[in-house]
Image: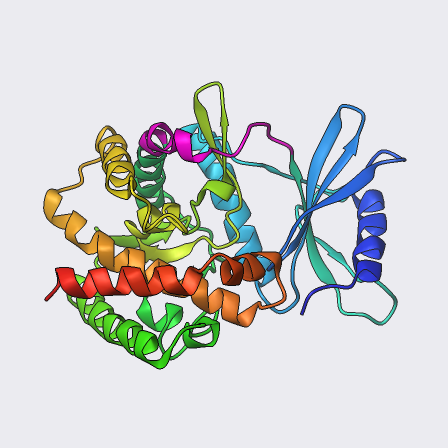
């Protein structure tokens, strides 16, 4: 359930005390999907406040996310927003919007500058992103997770199967009966191919899982990574599939994928035979996002997906997937 404006305002006001935020700060809503994210600013002072949705991530899951982000910056030099401790030294503050209300988890991040990559930037950005993904995957294999580590799992069962993190894809589908049957057939084949591919440690581990352009910033030739809220345990090459979100049918998709792969190979090996699973993971990602839209119909992104023909694009992708595997 989305927070009311009254609740958000109360939480922001209390957050100002918890982090000793300057008086007169303005709060501009950046996004409101799983969480409500605000840019706080006062003159040259800028921070980003994230108010977590109730009953989504546990405190341990959030701590695990923040730990990995900090470790990536410390160990590998990957620029991500860093969580800032409150006046009590804690990264996560527990704030109730009113007496008797359930506490929400709230985190304050430093502000990092840059601009979202545009379509014309994609090939160059994806070269950098592929190298960064390989660096993150190497780190994930080596990193000693904290004892309390807890994150979502992005295998088939937890993505689209019996226990989907964001719900099944069919509630978000807005096409004909014949179209839905095409996607159902592709879904069945996808499930089979993922089972055959397996979840060995060489291909399945801790990933960002949402490396789309909205979560990237470019500045001075560097690519920076935002929003680890969906990070979890999944297929490493799902990070490529998620980077192509909403661009799966783009005319330059093959060139963008090639740029990502070339960048990845500058850091870590990626055998050609591994790449055969990419179309399967692209369809998986497409359907996961459709499931998210079906369970979050009130959000701006879900509305945009309905208006921009996301279902039709999904059918096109499913048809191509079936044709290429016939």
Coloring scheme used: rainbow
Residue 277: quarter of image: bottom left
Q: How many marks?
A: 0
Residue 143, compared with residue 135, is above or below; it is below
Magenta region includes residue 251:
no
The stretch of residues the image draws in magenta is 111-128
Q: Residue 91: image x %, image y %?
A: 66, 46
> Can see residue 20?
no
> Can see residue 80?
yes
Where is the C terminus found, in terms of image quarters?
bottom left
Tell me the residue at 21%/61% (across/down). 321
Residue 48: quarter of image: top right
Tell me the residue at 57%/62% (across/down). 57
Q: As rendered, which of 59 and 182 lies closer to the eye? A: 182
Residue 321, compared with residue 203, is above or below; it is below
Q: Residue 121: image x %, image y %?
A: 41, 29
Tell me the residue at 85%/44% (across/down). 17
Where is the N terminus found, in terms of image quarters?
bottom right
Q: Is residue 93 left or right of residue 197?
A: right
Q: Is residue 240 left or right of residue 278?
A: right
């Amino acid at each position: 359930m989305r927070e009311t404006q009254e609740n958000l305002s109360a939480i922001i006001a209390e957050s100002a005390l918890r982090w000793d935020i300057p008086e007169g700060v303005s709060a501009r809503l950046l996004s409101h999907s799983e969480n409500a994210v605000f840019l706080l600013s006062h003159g040259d002072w800028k921070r980003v406040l994230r108010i977590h949705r109730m009953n989504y991530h546990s405190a341990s899951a959030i701590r695990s996310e923040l730990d990995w982000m900090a470790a990536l910056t410390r160990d590998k030099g990957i620029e991500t927003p860093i969580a800032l401790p409150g006046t009590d030294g804690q990264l996560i503050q527990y704030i109730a919007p009113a007496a008797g209300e359930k506490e929400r988890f709230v985190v304050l991040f430093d502000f990092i500058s840059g601009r979202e990559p545009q379509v014309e930037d994609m090939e160059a950005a994806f070269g950098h992103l592929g190298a960064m993904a390989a660096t993150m995957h190497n780190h994930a294999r080596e990193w000693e997770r904290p004892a309390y580590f807890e994150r979502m799992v992005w295998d088939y069962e937890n993505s689209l199967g019996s226990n989907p993190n964001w719900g099944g894809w069919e509630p978000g589908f807005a096409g004909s009966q014949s179209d839905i049957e095409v996607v159902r057939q592709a879904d069945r084949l996808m499930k089979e191919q993922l089972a055959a591919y397996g979840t060995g440690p060489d291909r399945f581990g801790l990933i960002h899982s949402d490396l789309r352009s909205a979560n990237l910033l470019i500045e001075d030739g560097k690519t920076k990574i935002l929003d680890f809220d969906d990070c979890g345990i999944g297929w490493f090459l799902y990070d490529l599939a998620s980077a192509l979100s909403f661009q799966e049918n783009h005319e330059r998709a093959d060139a963008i994928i090639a740029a990502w792969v070339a960048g990845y190979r500058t850091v870590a090996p990626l055998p050609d035979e591994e790449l055969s699973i990419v179309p399967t993971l692209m369809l998986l990602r497409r359907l996961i996002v459709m499931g998210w839209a079906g369970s979050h119909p009130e959000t701006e992104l879900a509305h945009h997906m309905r208006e921009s023909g996301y279902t039709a694009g999904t059918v096109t992708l499913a048809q191509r997937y079936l044709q290429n595997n016939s």
